[in-house]
Image (cartoon, rainbow, N blue to C red):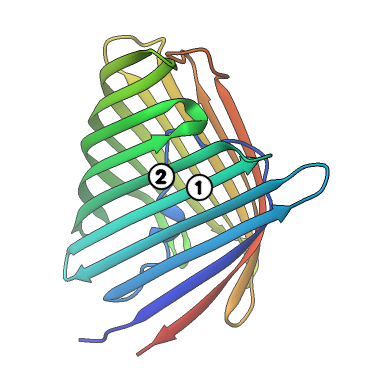
Amino acid sequence: MKNNIKIICFILLATFAKAQSIVNTESMSSKLDSTFVLTTSFDGDYTSGNIDLVQFNSANQLAFKKDKNLVRLFFNYEYISQDKEVISSDYTSQLRYSYALKNNSLYTFVQGQKAVSLSLNSRFLLGIGYRKSILKKNKNYLDIAFGPFYENEMYLKNSNEEVHIINYRYSFSSFFNFKITDKLQNNTVFYYQLNSENFKDYRIYLEPKIAYSFEHFKIYTTVRYRFHSTPYIEIKNTDSQILFGFSYDLGFN
């Protein structure tokens, strides 16, 4: 059995937005090409003067793959403060298990989340699903996935009132990767999450990404778009984010 540890770090050069509830794990899982993988990323910013701004982000994955079984643990954290006021102190953790069926797979996951930027005190998800390969040729692929999940959320409406939401949602998603040249590729992820009892309540997440590969690292740009049709408290229903950065791969055999 070949063991391989891969450490991936990137620095964020520019970002605009606040966090939202849908989390993209595809960008990390696409790097899983070994038995054991550790993926970690850090980025941050500090500004002082007319505006005092502190920003720190970290995304981490620990994964183990054996035969048809794949177990992944994700943990993401974001902290932003402006003039000593905390704007965002958000985390997301997810444990996911997948079982391969040739080019397709079955999966289940459990997820916990807190997002100060959304007045989200807690979010708990438990779900299952099926992922099917539509197209696979070299490094180009198109996959789709479907599955139901349970959603339990607690929002802080004001300092004295909480809003408790329980839903059962259907998740539809697609994952597209296209190799433009030997070193340039596009990866696009799309999620659509529909409330099973209220079809007017849905969430959308879209993330196209362009990356250029060198021998041991990549430079990339990506856009993240999140939309919730019916927010449960008075917050904006749309968030967008533009990222520029690079990643560095270090592998051991």
Above or below residue 4? Residue 57 is above
Percent coordinates x, y for residue 159 in the rendering:
43, 16
Percent coordinates x, y for residue 239 in the rendering:
59, 30
Left or right: 250 as drawn, with respect to 14: left
Say which of 119 and 200 sits in front.
119
Image disc number at residue 91: 2
What is the tally of numbered marks visible in this picture?
2
Image disc number at residue 184: none
Residue type (three-letter) at the residue carrying disc 2: Tyr
Using the rendered view, name the quadrant where residue 167 is placed.
top left
Using the rendered view, name the quadrant where residue 200 is placed.
top left
Quarter of the figure that contains the C terminus: bottom left
Q: Residue at x 35, y 15 (%)?
A: 162
Question: Around disc 2, counting alpha carbons within 10 Å, would you say few (fewer than 14), some (14 to 19), or many (20 or more)?
Answer: many
Identify the residue position indicated by label 1 in the image.
78
Q: Are marks 2 and 1 in contact (CB under 8 Å)?
A: yes
Q: Residue at x 36, y 29 (%)?
A: 121
* Secondary structure found at label 2: strand
Q: Earlier in the sequence, mark 2 or mark 1?
A: 1
Left or right: 192 as drawn, with respect to 178: left
Percent coordinates x, y for residue 170 in the rendering:
29, 26
Residue type (three-letter) at the residue carrying disc 1: Glu
Q: Residue furthest right?
A: 50
Inter-mark Cα distance, 2 to 1: 6 Å
Using the rendered view, name the quadrant where residue 182 is placed.
bottom right
* Secondary structure found at label 1: strand
Q: Residue furthest bottom?
A: 253
Q: Residue at x 29, y 40 (%)?
A: 112
Quarter of the figure that contains the N terminus: bottom left
Q: Residue at x 58, y 24 (%)?
A: 238
